[in-house]
């Protein structure tokens, strides 16, 4: 849950949305926004994990923090004088070097005292790329900072945060501007010829489960096609495009089925398509040793590309969040909640890999092989869905955290 807390803190310091996003993109590239992060290449060399290194530095049993040349924390502070200053700062306020509050405050101290030109950009810019490059080239200065691919990648991370916190918050307001509502539901193309539609019975709805296809084809027509004799077949084919291979999930015998798909229409627009009743039992995540989330979780597939296009990712991610928020509102589901099923506490919102980890699905990696590439997780999903429903990008836990940060600054 560090994303929202970091965004809120940096915004409270007077940075623009673009400035915060550009800075956060770099922090994600450095540490994954983990304030306890020990540089991966030093873990084996020093014999520590993130947690054990932090504890050993805090309690004094490891005394070479300043001079060991290992990157540490949100910014991966590495040079001895900056690590020495970080350590002294944390000791002075009685905080662990791995607390989120302390390094954020130290980061602002550095920017204010030693990197004023960078801070000036972050306080005034309207360009995520400008902010990202300023942090990369003047503050972080990694070995490959002049590589255009590195610059573009970090700016892409920053743009994701901008979209997540600035654009979505501005557009959604009080939650009434959700893309999908009871009067404007997702597009429907019920695939009644499919093995799943004809064979699956009804179930009690407990949550929403994300999948992605595992194939480089972002087009909905690959998987979704209308029934042969449906009245709106011509219209649906115009919208979806025609699968000339006949291998869509409505025209082959396949013991698999989900309730909806997210991907590209024939026009190239990203959209959701509902292909069956929401309360049908899914044939999506398989079974694990404790049962299956097919019993009660609405499931949808996101059409993958080659997993290297941040623009496509952001579009389908946002579309999937919209669809999930719509379903949560439709069935009064708590996006941050859990339910007990088959003796297991199961998140209301989860993915295929999550279902496997808790013994309620088969061993597939989706969507956790894709989301982390762009700074997302299933907790990010839950936070974004919550924000969309509530019309804000904070929750009570984050509000409390930010309040404590501000109090500590004042003190």
Image (cartoon, rainbow, N blue to C red):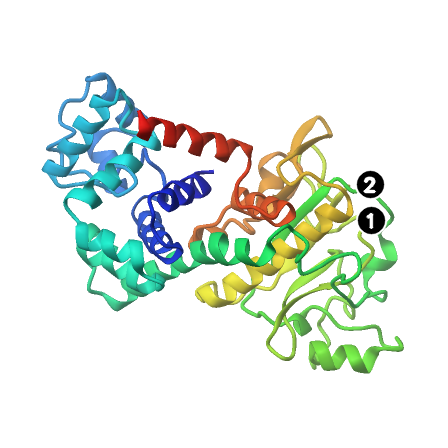
Residue at horizontal 23 percent and vertical 26 percent from the top? 90
Q: Secondary structure at mark 2?
A: loop
**Which residue is the site of mark 2?**
204
Label 2 vs label 1: CA separation? 7 Å
* Sooner in the amino-acid sequence: mark 2 or mark 1: 2
Name the spot of residue 204 as percent of width and height, x first.
82, 41
Residue at horizontal 48 percent and vertical 30 percent from the top? 400
Q: Residue 194, located in which quarter of the rendered image?
A: bottom right
The answer to the question of whether label 2 and label 1 lie on touching residues, with beta carbons closer than 8 A, is yes
Name the spot of residue 287 as percent of width and height, x first.
69, 41
Name the spot of residue 198 as percent of width and height, x first.
87, 58
Q: Secondary structure at mark 1?
A: loop
Residue at horizontal 81 percent and vertical 66 percent from the top? 191
Residue at horizontal 58 percent and vertical 69 percent from the top? 218
**Which residue is the site of mark 1?**
279
Q: Is residue 360 above or below residue 169?
A: above
């Amino acid at each position: 849950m560090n994303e929202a807390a970091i965004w809120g803190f940096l915004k409270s310091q007077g940075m623009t949305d673009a400035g915060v996003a550009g800075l956060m993109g770099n922090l994600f590239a450095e540490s994954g926004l983990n304030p306890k992060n020990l540089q991966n290449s030093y873990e084996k060399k020093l014999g520590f994990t993130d947690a054990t290194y932090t504890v050993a530095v805090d309690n004094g049993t490891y005394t070479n923090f300043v001079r060991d040349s290992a990157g540490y924390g949100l910014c991966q502070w590495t040079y001895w004088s900056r690590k020495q200053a970080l350590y002294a700062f944390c000791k002075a306020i009685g905080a662990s070097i791995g607390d989120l509050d302390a390094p954020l405050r130290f980061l602002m101290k550095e920017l204010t005292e030693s990197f004023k030109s960078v801070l000036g950009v972050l306080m005034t810019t309207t360009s995520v790329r400008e902010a990202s490059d300023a942090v990369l080239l003047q503050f972080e200065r990694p070995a490959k900072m002049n590589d255009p691919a590195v610059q573009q990648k970090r700016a892409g991370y920053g743009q994701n945060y901008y979209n997540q916190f600035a654009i979505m918050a501005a557009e959604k307001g009080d939650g009434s501007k959700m893309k999908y509502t009871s009067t404007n539901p997702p597009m429907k193309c019920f695939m009644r010829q499919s093995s799943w539609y004809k064979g699956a019975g009804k179930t009690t709805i407990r949550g929403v489960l994300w999948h992605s296809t595992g194939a480089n084809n972002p087009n909905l027509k690959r998987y979704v096609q209308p029934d042969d004799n449906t009245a709106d077949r011509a219209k649906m084919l115009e919208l979806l495009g025609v699968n000339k291979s006949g291998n869509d999930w409505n025209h082959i015998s396949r013991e698999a089925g989900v309730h909806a798909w997210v991907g590209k229409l024939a026009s190239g627009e990203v959209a959701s398509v509902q292909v069956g009743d929401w309360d049908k039992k899914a044939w999506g995540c398989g079974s694990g040793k404790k049962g299956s989330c097919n019993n009660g979780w609405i499931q949808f597939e996101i059409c993958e590309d080659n997993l290297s296009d941040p623009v496509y990712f952001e579009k389908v991610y946002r579309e999937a969040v919209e669809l999930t928020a719509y379903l949560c509102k439709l069935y009064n589901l708590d996006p941050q909640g859990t339910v007990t099923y088959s003796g297991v506490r199961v998140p209301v919102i989860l993915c295929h890999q999550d279902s496997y980890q808790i013994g309620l699905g088969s061993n597939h990696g989706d969507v956790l092989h894709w989301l982390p590439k762009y700074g997302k997780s299933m907790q990010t999903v839950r936070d974004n869905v919550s924000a969309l429903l509530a019309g804000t990008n904070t929750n009570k836990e984050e509000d409390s955290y930010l309040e404590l940060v501000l109090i500590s600054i004042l003190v």
